[in-house]
Image (cartoon, rainbow, N blue to C red):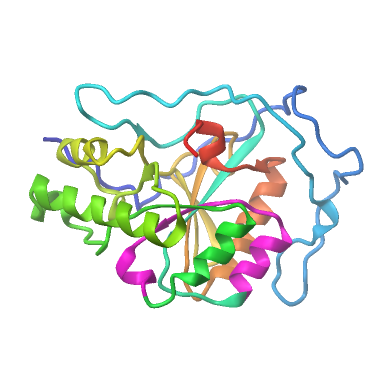
Amino acid sequence: MTLMTGLNSCAAPDAGGTGPSNPTLLMDPSASPEAPTSSPATGIPSDSTKRILKGYVPDYQIPPVQNGLAPVITRIATKHPVVFLTIDDGITKKPEMAALMDRFDYPASLFLTRDFIQNDPGFFKGLQAQGSLIENHTTSHNVNMTTQFSYARQLAEITAMQDYALQQYGRRPTLFRPPGGTYSNVMRKAVADAGLKAIITWEAKANAGHMDYQTGHSLRPGDIVLMHFRPEFATDLAAFRQAQLDAGLEVVLLENFLGAT
């Protein structure tokens, strides 16, 4: 069994960049190409430069389950100028989080842990109403699952979160994120057996008010970005928004692009 580790660390920066805009994407013609201004309250670039994605044709197909193992997706191979925001855990819950997500019309894949959200599951219903989707991040967030838990216990952690999400949010998750980003073939089998379509990792992260990249030094089309529901949510979102605008990318919902809604 091979463990995939080190996803929380960043590779040394090297050459990076973004591809050209795809002409099949219909953008708001009134969008300003100039650098955004920032809100003095949050430091987040203002709405004045927001570009609205009118429509696109996904050019990526989620890999199938093979040999009983769920596929692992770290980045989407796409020519479209899109980026995918994912937010984990759910420990910190502040009204400003939902307000900021609504202000910038950011849909996100919310990889939530039952033990972190069960004191206030309703908070995430507000984000769900904005267009975000609730996904599976286990019930207990044990970062040592791959070494400490048997297949049966891993499956129980995953299926229990499936049931909880369905009960609370009316939808059974389709995507899974391992606690700490570490996975194994045993976990991939448990994910597939729980009925999920893929394990989702990342190569870019908004953390402590700045962006970390495992490859390159800027966002690229198809990047999956990791954030967390933490006290520094506003500054992390500010870092992400600045990087997103600088790269000329649109934030779209990962599940829509994958056909995994």
Q: Is residue 223 visible?
A: no
Indicate the position of residue 78 as horizontal and vertical percent values. 57, 26
Residue at the (29%, 26%) spot, across then down? 65
- Magenta range: 96-118
Residue sitting farthest toward the right: 30
Q: Is residue 179 left or right of residue 154?
A: right
Residue 98 drawn in magenta: yes
Residue 106 seen in this snapshot: yes
Residue at figure coordinates x 39%, y 48% from the top left: 172
Residue 171's x, y, as percent?
Answer: 44, 50
Would you identify the image quadrant in which residue 3 lies?
A: top left
The image shows residue 35 at horizontal and vertical percentages of 81, 52
In the rendered image, which quarter is residue 179 located in? bottom left
On screen, residue 170 versus residue 246, left or right, reads left
- Residue 14, image x, y percentages: 50, 38
Where is 143 relative to 57, above or below?
Answer: below
Q: Is residue 54 above or below residue 217?
A: above
Q: Quadrant of the N terminus?
A: top left
> Left or right: where does residue 87 sit relative to residue 71?
right
Quarter of the image for residue 59 reads: top right
User: Which residue is drawn at the image coordinates 50% and 75% (left, top)?
Assistant: 93
Query: Relative to residue 15, is residue 77 depicted above or below?
Result: above
